Image: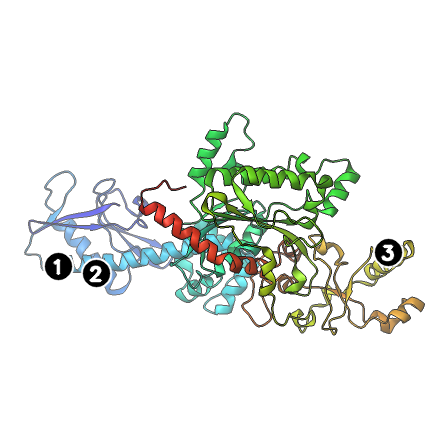
């Protein structure tokens, strides 16, 4: 950092020069002068050298400006060169007697102002990557301190003027738009990483039992925005990655397995638990049907996503976490006549891991968990929990015990709905007629294709599976608003009945149906458009399911941490 260096009465006085003051603030005439920018006076002193300056505060007003102006004038009148770079004043100068105290006070003030300015700049930069300008302007206007518009905010961000423009109350309010650290911060019980994280559905439960996320990987830029809006990422101990292949180097044929493993160990911190909901599309029924129709490969033959499981394998092999939790669609078991699932289980076994309930393959497989036990949505997912064999943590663990975590009273579908919604969520007459006729046509053929109408007044109603395509028409989960079916069969266009057309869920209702929030709890932040929100919730997991898995694993995670710490204390190799 540049220094102020003065010789006052035969004694050297030094102070740090804030980085906010640059050489552009000084003239080269070797005389004191003043510049006017707007209505602000700025004191300008001769440039002693490229890194030795004397200056007042960045913007001086009132008594501070008058004092510095007098000092500058005195220094210019009575300077006594003692070298090419230094200037001195006689000790008898009354103006200089309290110079050290004034400089010290001035620079304490500058230091605090500089820190506050840097914080405001960093905060605005971070928020601009999460929220759109319209949202941020609305938040700033709600504070009521000064006028804001989209153009003003964009200009402030582009020119780096947040420190000058934002007032303390506005900075404090903007800070509330970022997630707070968990209650147990910084006293974490274990460390975990979150691969193919989406919007953090799996992370939630493991953070709730005391875990610290030290690495996150998610490639979708919109999902990253939602993730960062809701989950605390320690700037010192957390790393965010977009493309996991940049870590595993799986796209580079010129990299050996040993080099890739070394790069993984350098890039991903040590952790006790690995979480991964690797991409569903290559193994889902909808994805397979679509790719078959298009003549495209799917599953492990799909080079774009199918091989991402092997990126997970590379990370497990290189880092060897004590426990992993993998999630995928139920169809993973039957994909390619069961060959895909056999390859996965064989690979995990060769890595030295015991997968819970590995021997169960029938219809009552405990690895397949339905979200309807926690929330009113039928959503089956396969959960693979693996324990490192040499740690002997797996004995007696079964996912059948998750039944003990079922809520005593499951929320009803109606309880998750908002009391009032925008009319835009009601189906248009044209779309409703199309869905209605489409369903009738397939019913006549004897199959179940069609819309899913859910009665919110029925406490036993269970919705179909929310999918990533929900944004298109909302057909799989429609909220019944009193549509008269017999009347619809006779006279579909009846005006009164048309007023009771069903509606789709709002994004916030989707968040509740997936367990990211409850009507009485803290609100889940949704910084993206409705379309992106529907995609994100449709691709996510039922949060309480993995919160229950985390609770089942908590005692075994504690054992793994105790063994790791004992290993570290004994001088063992950290993995």
Local packing at callout 1 (Cα closer than 10 Å; few below 14, some 14-19, many 20+) is some
The outermost residue toward the right is 490
Residue located beneath label 3 in the image:
438
Q: Where residue 405 sits: x, y (%)?
A: 58, 64
Local packing at callout 2 (Cα closer than 10 Å; few below 14, some 14-19, many 20+) is few
Query: Does residue 236 appear in this view?
Result: no
Residue located beneath label 1 in the image:
95
Circle 3/circle 2 CB separation < 8 Å: no
Q: Residue at x 31, y 57 (%)?
A: 59
Residue 105's label in the rendered image is: 2
Q: Please report whichever mark, 1 or 3, sits nearer to the chain's N-terminal start.
A: 1
Drawn side of residue 337 relative to residue 499, left or right: left
Colouring convention used in this rendered image of the protein:
rainbow
Q: How far apart are labels 3 and 2 at the CA level?
A: 77 Å
Secondary structure state at the residue bearing disc 2:
helix
Drawn side of residue 241 relative to residue 435, left or right: left
Quarter of the figure with the C terminus: top left
Drawn side of residue 87 relative to residue 423, left or right: left
Q: Where residue 357 sits: x, y (%)?
A: 60, 50
Secondary structure state at the residue bearing disc 1:
helix
């Amino acid at each position: 950092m540049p220094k102020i260096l003065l010789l006052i009465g035969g004694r050297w006085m030094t102070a740090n020069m804030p980085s906010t003051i640059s050489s552009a603030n000084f003239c080269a005439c070797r005389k004191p002068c003043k510049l006017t920018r707007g209505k602000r006076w700025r004191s300008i002193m001769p440039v002693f050298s490229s890194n030795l300056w004397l200056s007042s505060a960045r913007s001086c007003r009132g008594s501070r400006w008058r004092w510095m102006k007098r000092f500058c004038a005195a220094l210019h009148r009575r300077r006594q060169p003692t070298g090419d770079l230094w200037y001195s004043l006689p000790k008898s100068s009354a103006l200089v007697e309290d110079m050290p105290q004034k400089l010290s006070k001035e620079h304490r003030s500058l230091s605090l102002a500089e820190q506050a300015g840097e914080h405001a700049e960093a905060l605005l930069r971070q928020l601009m990557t999460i929220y759109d300008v319209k949202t941020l302007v609305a938040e700033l206007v709600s504070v009521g301190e000064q006028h804001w518009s989209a153009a003003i905010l964009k200009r402030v961000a582009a020119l780096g003027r947040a420190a000058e423009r934002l007032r303390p109350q506005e900075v404090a309010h903007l800070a509330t738009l970022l997630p707070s650290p968990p209650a147990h911060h910084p006293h974490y019980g274990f460390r975990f990483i979150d691969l193919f994280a989406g919007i953090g559905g799996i992370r939630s439960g493991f953070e709730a039992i005391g875990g610290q996320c030290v690495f996150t990987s998610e490639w979708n830029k919109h999902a990253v925005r939602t993730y960062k809006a809701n989950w605390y990422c320690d700037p010192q101990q957390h790393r965010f990655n977009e493309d996991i292949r940049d870590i595993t180097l799986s796209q580079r044929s010129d990299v050996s397995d040993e080099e890739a493993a070394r790069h993984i160990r350098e890039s991903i911190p040590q952790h006790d638990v690995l979480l991964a909901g690797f991409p569903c599309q290559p193994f889902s029924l909808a994805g397979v049907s679509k790719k078959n129709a298009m003549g495209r490969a799917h599953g492990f033959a799909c080079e774009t996503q199918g091989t991402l499981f092997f990126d997970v394998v590379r990370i497990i092999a290189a880092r060897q976490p004590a426990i992993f939790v993998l999630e995928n669609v139920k169809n993973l078991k039957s994909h390619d006549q069961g060959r895909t699932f056999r390859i996965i289980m064989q690979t995990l076994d060769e890595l030295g891991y015991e997968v819970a309930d590995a021997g169960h393959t029938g219809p009552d497989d405990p690895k397949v968990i339905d979200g309807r036990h926690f929330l009113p949505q039928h959503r089956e997912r396969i959960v693979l929990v693996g324990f490192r064999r040499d740690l002997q943590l797996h004995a007696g663990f079964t996912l059948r015990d998750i039944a003990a975590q079922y809520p005593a009273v499951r929320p009803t579908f109606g309880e998750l709905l908002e009391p009032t919604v925008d009319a835009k969520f009601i189906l248009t007459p044209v779309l409703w007629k199309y869905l209605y006729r489409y369903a009738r046509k397939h019913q006549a053929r004897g199959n179940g294709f069609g819309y899913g109408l859910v009665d919110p007044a029925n406490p036993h109603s269970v919705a179909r599976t929310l999918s990533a395509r929900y944004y298109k028409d909302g057909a799989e989960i429609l909220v019944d608003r009193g549509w008269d079916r017999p009347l619809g069969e006779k006279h579909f266009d009846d005006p009164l009945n048309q007023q009771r057309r069903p509606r789709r869920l709002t994004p916030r209702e989707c968040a509740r149906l997936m367990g990211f929030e409850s009507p009485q709890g803290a609100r889940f932040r949704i910084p993206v458009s409705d379309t992106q929100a529907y995609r994100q919730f449709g691709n996510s997991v039922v949060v309480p399911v993995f919160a229950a898995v985390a609770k089942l694993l908590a005692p075994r995670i504690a054992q793994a941490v105790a063994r790791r710490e004992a290993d570290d204390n004994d001088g063992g190799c950290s993995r």
